[in-house]
Amino acid sequence: MIRFLAGKAVQGIATLIIAVSVAFFLARGTGNPVREMLGDLASAEQVAQLNAQLGLDRPLSVQYLHFLGDLVTGNLGDSLRYGSSNLELIQSRLPASIQLAAAAMFIAVLFGVPLGIWAALREGRLADRLASAVALAGQSIPLFWLGLMLILLFAVGLGWLPAGQSTGFSSLILPAVTLSTLPMAQIARLTRSSMSEVLGEAFLSAAQARGIPRWRIVLIHALQNASLPVITIIALQAGTLLSGAITVEFVFAWPGLGTLATQAVQTRDFSLIQAIVVFGAAVFVVVNLIVDLLYGVLDPRIRDGVA
Amino acid sequence: MTEERRVLDVDRLSVVHRARGRRGHPVVAVDDVSLGVGAGEIVGVVGESGSGKTSLAMAVAGLGKISTGKVTVSGTEVGKRFSRSARAEIQVILQDPHGSLDPRQSVRRGLRELRGIHSERTAWVTDEELLAKVGLTADLLDRLPHQMSGGQAQRVSIARALLLRPSLLLADEPTSALDVSVQAQILRLLLELRRTEGLAILFISHDLAVVRAVCDQVHVMLRGQVVEHGVTAEVFDRPAHEYTRRLLAAIPGRQTASPAEQAHVSDDSIPGDGHRSPTPVL
């Protein structure tokens, strides 16, 4: 188990190094960040002064090593636009993003898992095709369009819910519903396929023959054995939602990490963009590590190395 | 055998599977089959693949379709309103020993689940005593299916079936996925359970040698119909139907002892397999 954990930790660190390196070189490889920030009218002296101030006049390898060194000590740098620490900025927006991601994931699981089970139990029938159509629609509808339609209907038309910003529970509903559609569709599709596979297993026939109630066969025996891919997609989607649901946050003016990232791009705050990318990569690595650990807990065959 | 002693009655059973696709024809898997199993009796059903054995078994167990006819287990008709306690009267042992156990459920948890559902039928024996009845030791209680050998897993399946005190055990190819020596052990166990627990067994198999060794009566199936039936020794010694003769002729020449022969003569258990040495029963 320790060997398994160590292997996963090394993989995670390697992934993180690659991700932060990409973020570092992209920020510098797409032009001079200082020139982009100050604009074309800035004088050469002003550009040189800011370059020196930000350490951008030093060789790239030195900058890179300095950047990695800062990351090790938890220093994500300072925002050029806001003048405060990037970490503090991320921390200030994180609660809103967590709130939105948690609400969206709750809705996605609440509807996606039962929809997938329902479709699997009626495989090949009309109900299955209907569920598949709903899932396909969920995966295909552009989020910005859905968000705008929901605002038009529930905020502008009916006036039941606020159109944007974080002003309490009611303001969470529309962005959470919008954000939940993609993960809900993916969860429903994966639950269906995984359950369909498991429902043909002999141990479920044996369970039925032993007089075990049908609800228990489906929800305990079948669902548990079909849960690994579903849990994987839930965890990975949770990581995606947490690290910034840029479109939805932008449409609903939600004060989370997605909006912060949009503002950083608009103001060419490369230091903040870099910090948000690093944070997103770290979230992904941690979520993946948790999923790998969950595999061992949920399926003893993986822990024993036989599956 | 009198009618009163019958545990299983299959009366003119037919199973017709729906056609697949627009141009497909319905498939008659079981065609007007009648058979009975008395208390403590082992009745075999043999036939090649596709002869309808498994459709018959599934219908009898209440797991498959019954198109026409009637199946009665201990006086209760098998059908849509098959109650939980009636279902417990007939228990199945399937071909794949590992596949018929929930991969995430230890032996103990599996037994506990059944005790919770059938509390009125399961208080007669402790887990340890139950495992001993199938030749297993209590140290297997906390094992998961993948931590057991095929023989151990099949014994656990038999133990789970026994816990419910069924009148009839439906064994659908119970030894075909096992090694020859383990097959012999499982056959010995079934024979012992017939003797000690008075179990009636409907034994589905394509292995004629095994059927000859363990079954009192045999039914030979071809394309969904029973083409010949009778006392096993008589059917095997004087087959009346051409198909039965062909089946018997197709038994390969045996260079080594078959599982059936081992079930007769051998009393060895596999060392380190977690089994107790079963008593010879034949």
Image: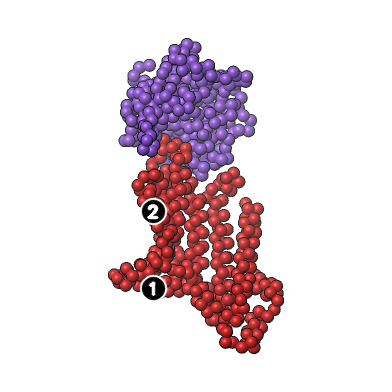
Chain colours: A red, B purple
Disc 1 versus disc 2: distance between alpha carbons?
A: 29 Å
Disc number for residue A108: none
The subunit carrying tag 1 is: A
- Residue at 35% of width from left, 72% of height from top? A162
Crowd band around label 2 with a 10 angstrom C-alpha radius: few (<14), some (14–19), many (20+): few
Element on which disc 1 rests: loop
| Left or right of A162 on screen, residue B152 | right
Above-or-below relation of B75 to A297: above
The subunit carrying tag 2 is: A
| Left or right of B62 on screen, residue A270 | right
> Mark 1 — residue?
A164
Amino acid carrying mark 1 in the image = Gly
- Residue at 61% of width from left, 71% of height from top? A26
- Residue at 49% of width from left, 56% of height from top? A233
- Residue at 56% of width from left, 58% of height from top? A288
Corner quadrant of residue B59: top left
Corner quadrant of residue B118: top left
Residue sticking out furthest to the top: B238
The total of numbered circles placed on residues is 2
Q: Which of A6 and B49 is in front in this view?
A: B49
Element on which disc 2 rests: helix
Query: Which of disc 2 and disc 1 is earlier in sequence?
Result: 2
Q: Which of A259 and B94 is in front in this view?
A: A259
Crowd band around label 1 with a 10 angstrom C-alpha radius: few (<14), some (14–19), many (20+): many
